């Protein structure tokens, strides 16, 4: 194994350009040369004995072996591994001069190299070699007096401690190097994965046909893909400064109302809001405007704090055009169907009003025709109304309306239907509570909600209508039922035109999915709002909140404070 010492390994090769065995020999030859220089300058020829010369010869042999190993890579490893032992033998011989010298301390270096190369086994070899080749010959040569016993024991002790330290340090370094190599491999793999993911993400971001924007926590644009640059050029013909909150030519879903600063998608996203399908129009000229569906999601850091947002802009101009064409077609067809249907029903009424004009069986058949004509006329009216509401052409005839009286009339009209279905129809109404509203449209809201509640409540259930006044000068109308309820996943689409729940489809309950959409349009046209709470199998509660002053700040109406005594049951 490769030893880890200052003169060895990558450090030694980088420092000298020589292999490790030769580097070690060069390091050891430096103090040997210094000792020899001292003897030459200040000693006498008798100071250099046979043993000293033999030590120098061994050093030369070891250096020659190290040089051969450097020049000939095929030299066996065992040859280079024995070099520290040869050095210890040379050091032992060189210590045996008449007056003694300090060469014995050099035994530390070969011992450290043995420990570095062979760990604890090398420590044992170093101690044995030091005792056998340095300490024992020294005692034999100089005699066993106290001073030489001290030297003979001190040198192996120092050698052993240094060798153990080097062996332990080398093992620790190797483990750390192994861990670092594994971490390096993992980091390289992770970096390669990041680079690959970056390339993939960049390809996706630049290829997808949606606008992508990433904002940092200060509202600066970090990432903008090419598709969104097209949207920016259309919205900001004079240039964009790369920050959230620039208004430009951005319009609401109606295509004409300029968005305020607070209504901008980027501003909403920077407030931490998550939203989807937020429709805006962009473009300076009406004929060039594009419709975008915007979705946003906040980005959180490791601590859960807001760290920016990501927005997706999808061009839905073609979809909006198709929907407008469909709405225009539905409105046109509905309008064209309404006139002949009205004529059919008028002539049916004339025939049925004439006593004896038709036989009893024919009268029954004509009544069936009339009921179906009325149903078809209601459907056509709903379609026409929905188209008008979608275009913002819903006209209101606002006047003071006694809301409890209007609600009671709806309950009375639907009471026979509740009785037929075995549903208890209850109401809790104030004696009088006047609001500014369109009585026909509000009656339509109550009828739709009560009709739905009765439709989706099985026999034995209960439908309750309540009216309460809130603290904000508003009126809340609540319709609760104990019916089949609505799945949580379907609540967000409940007020969408032509949407029907899965349960309604499964139970084959009649309807086309326009009632709640129309109801929502009427309520919002009165500056109110409608909410729903529901659980499958437990029923639903629809809450309609209307301002008492009416839409657009109409004059406040008077109020009656008396309550009807207790709930009243209509039907069975």
Image: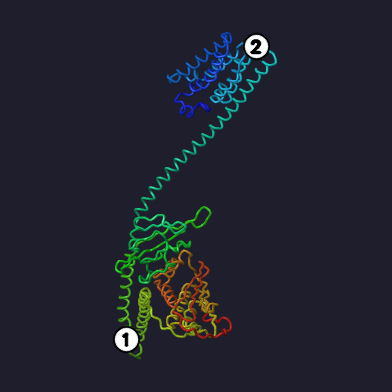
Horizontal and vertical percent position of residue 187: 46, 41
Q: Is residue 524 rendered to the left or right of residue 170?
A: left
Q: Residue at x 47, y 40 (%)?
A: 186
Question: Of helix, strand and loop, which one carries label 2?
Answer: helix
Depth order, front residue of 531/485 = 531
**Secondary element at image label 1:** helix
Residue 56 x, y percent position in the rendering: 53, 13
- Residue linked to disc 2: 142
Please tell me which of labels 2 and 1 falls first in the chain.
2
Query: Which of the labelled discs sits on residue 347, or is there none?
Result: 1
Mark closer to the observer (2, 1): 2
Label disc, if present, on residue 530 of the rendered structure: none
Q: Rate crowding at label 1 as few (under 14), some (14 to 19) or many (20 or more) other CA atoms within 10 Å.
A: few
457 above or below 571? above
Which residue is most to the front? 42
Most foreground residue, 466 or 37: 37
């Amino acid at each position: 194994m490769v030893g880890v010492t200052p003169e060895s390994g990558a450090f030694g090769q980088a420092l000298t350009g020589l292999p490790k065995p030769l580097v070690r020999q060069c390091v050891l030859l430096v103090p040997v040369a210094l000792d020899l220089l001292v003897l030459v300058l200040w000693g006498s020829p008798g100071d250099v004995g046979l043993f000293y010369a033999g030590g120098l010869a061994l050093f030369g042999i070891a250096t020659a072996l190290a040089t051969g190993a450097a020049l000939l890579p095929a030299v066996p490893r065992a040859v280079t591994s024995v070099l520290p032992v040869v050095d210890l033998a040379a050091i032992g011989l060189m210590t045996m001069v008449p007056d003694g010298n300090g060469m014995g301390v050099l035994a530390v270096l070969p011992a450290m190299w043995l420990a570095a190369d062979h760990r604890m086994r090398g420590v044992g070899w170093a101690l044995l070699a030091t005792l056998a080749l340095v300490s024992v010959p020294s005692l034999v040569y100089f005699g066993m007096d106290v001073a030489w016993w001290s030297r003979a024991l001190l040198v192996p002790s120092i050698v052993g401690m240094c060798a153990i330290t080097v062996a332990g340090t080398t093992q620790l370094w190797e483990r750390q190097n192994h861990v670092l190599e594994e971490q390096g491999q993992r980091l390289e793999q992770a970096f390669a994965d990041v680079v690959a993911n970056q390339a993939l993400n960049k390809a996706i971001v630049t290829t997808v046909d949606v606008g992508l924007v990433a904002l940092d926590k200060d509202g600066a644009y970090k990432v903008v893909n090419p598709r969104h640059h097209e949207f920016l050029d259309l919205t900001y013909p004079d240039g964009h400064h790369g920050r959230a909150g620039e208004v430009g030519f951005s319009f609401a879903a109606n295509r004409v109302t300029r968005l305020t600063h607070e209504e901008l998608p980027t501003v909403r996203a920077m407030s931490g809001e998550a939203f989807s399908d937020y429709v805006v129009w962009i473009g300076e000229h009406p004929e060039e405007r594009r419709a975008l569906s915007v979705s946003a999601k906040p980005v959180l850091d490791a601590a859960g704090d807001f760290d920016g947002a990501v927005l997706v802009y999808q061009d839905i101009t073609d979809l909006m055009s198709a929907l407008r064409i469909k709405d225009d077609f539905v409105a046109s067809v509905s309008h064209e169907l309404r006139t002949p249907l009205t004529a059919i029903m008028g002539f049916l009424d004339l025939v049925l009003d004439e006593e004896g004009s038709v036989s009893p069986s024919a009268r029954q058949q004509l009544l069936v025709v009339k009921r179906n004509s009325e149903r078809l006329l209601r459907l056509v009216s709903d379609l026409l109304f929905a188209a008008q509401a979608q275009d913002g052409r819903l006209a209101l005839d606002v006047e003071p309306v006694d809301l409890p009286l209007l609600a009671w009339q709806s309950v009375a009209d639907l009471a026979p239907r509740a009785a037929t279905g075995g549903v208890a129809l209850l109401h809790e109404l104030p004696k009088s509570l006047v609001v500014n509203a369109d009585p026909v449209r509000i009656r339509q809201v109550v009828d739709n909600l009560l009709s739905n509640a009765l439709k989706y409540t099985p026999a034995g259930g209960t439908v309750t209508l309540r009216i309460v006044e809130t603290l904000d000068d508003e009126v809340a109308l609540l319709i609760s039922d104990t019916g089949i309820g609505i799945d949580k996943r379907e609540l967000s689409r409940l007020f969408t035109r032509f949407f029907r729940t899965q349960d309604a489809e499964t139970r084959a309950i009649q309807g086309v999915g326009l009632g709640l959409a129309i109801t929502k349009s009427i309520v919002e046209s009165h500056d109110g709002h409608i909410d729903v709470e529901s659980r499958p199998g437990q029923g639903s509660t629809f809450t309609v909140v209307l301002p008492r002053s009416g839409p657009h700040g109409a004059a406040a109406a008077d109020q009656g404070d008396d309550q009807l005594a207790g709930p009243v049951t209509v039907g069975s």
